[in-house]
Amino acid sequence: MFDKGDCLVEVLPYIKRFYSKTVVIKYGGSAMIDPSLKDSFSKDVALLKYVGINPIIVHGGGPEIGEVLKKLNMESKFYEGLRITDEGTMEVVVMVLAGKVNKEIVLQINKNGGKAVGISGVDAQIIKAKKKLLKDVDLGLVGDVDHVNPTILTHLSQSGYIPVVSPIGVDDDGKRYNINADSVASAIAISLRAEKLIYLTDTDGVLDKDGKLISSIEINQITHLINDGTITGGMIPKLLSAKEAIEKGVGKVHIINGTRLHSLLEEIFTQEGVGSQIYAQNRES
């Protein structure tokens, strides 16, 4: 018979272990669209804060940007999955990411008992950006993270707030750049030496060649898994980013299915978890 009391007691060691620690969460995919998933995610984040963990949210918003561009009769152009961003498109990116999407996430978390504050990487120059340079094409105002100044994020977290960050950066000349949200989440996690970096996706995690979940991956296995074709497509940059984050001080990286209700809590507060964890051998515990 299922005992709710036993379940609650089992959570206690994880609350103690992660108390006052920082968890950076990349929020995207279906979890940002489906109403029940949005509600579940917001409750999970509020709960994390109430038990003494410091969540920092970095969100995407590509589909929403595309939708607004379509309404404005502006063409969406991509190169290898990256949105080519001219001046007009950048105005829409800022409006959608720093405005509509960011404030909807903040509203949802606050409605469920959290104290979220929405900011972009431009605020207090949190994300210093540089133009992404490719040989074959000019992507326009698409950037890479050059440097993260985490001071305001730390201040907000220590003051009881949940920062919600849109992935827009700024260079020394005040020019804004559209930056991949995965990259921003990783850079922020590194700058804060976060206990965990969690990517919410629409898949269960990293899958083997038979489509079965690989629950744990040591960072020294990643190159082999890429070379033998186990890891392909969009999962390659996620795993390489995870490897870099761990090598630069992040405790663990998790890739989980955001379409599963309360997957965030299950991954953090259970031994088995629900997704794939990436770790360094000397920090497996």
Image (cartoon, rainbow, N blue to C red):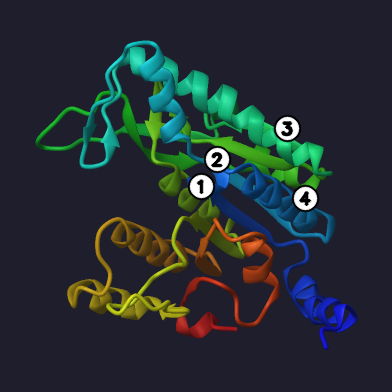
Labels 4 and 3 touching (C-beta < 8 A): no
Distance between the alpha carbons at the discs numbered 2 and 1: 5 Å
Labels 2 and 1 touching (C-beta < 8 A): yes
Q: Is residue 109 visible?
A: yes
Which residue matches tag 3?
A: 107
Q: Going from the N terminus, do you reach mark 4 or mark 3 first?
A: 4
Which residue is depicted at the point 46% across and 84% down? 281
The secondary element bearing badge 4 is classed as: helix
Query: Of discs 3 and 1, which sits in the foreground?
Result: 1
Image side of residue 19 versus residue 97, left or right: right
Distance between the alpha carbons at the discs numbered 3 and 1: 18 Å
Which residue matches tag 1?
A: 30
The secondary element bearing badge 2 is classed as: loop
User: Could you classify mark 1 by the number of other residues whose Cα lies within 10 Å: few (under 14), some (14-19), or many (20 or more)?
Assistant: some
Residue 16 sits in quarter: bottom right
Estimate the x, y position of residue 48 in percent, counting from the top left. Answer: 76, 58
The residue type indicated by label 3 comes to Leu
Distance between the alpha carbons at the discs numbered 2 and 4: 19 Å
The residue type indicated by label 1 comes to Ser
Residue 129 sits in quarter: top left
Return the residue found at the far bottom: 1
Image height of 212 relative to 178, above or below: below
Quick one: quadrant of the C terminus?
A: bottom right
Which residue matches tag 2?
A: 33
The secondary element bearing badge 3 is classed as: helix
Which residue matches tag 4?
A: 46
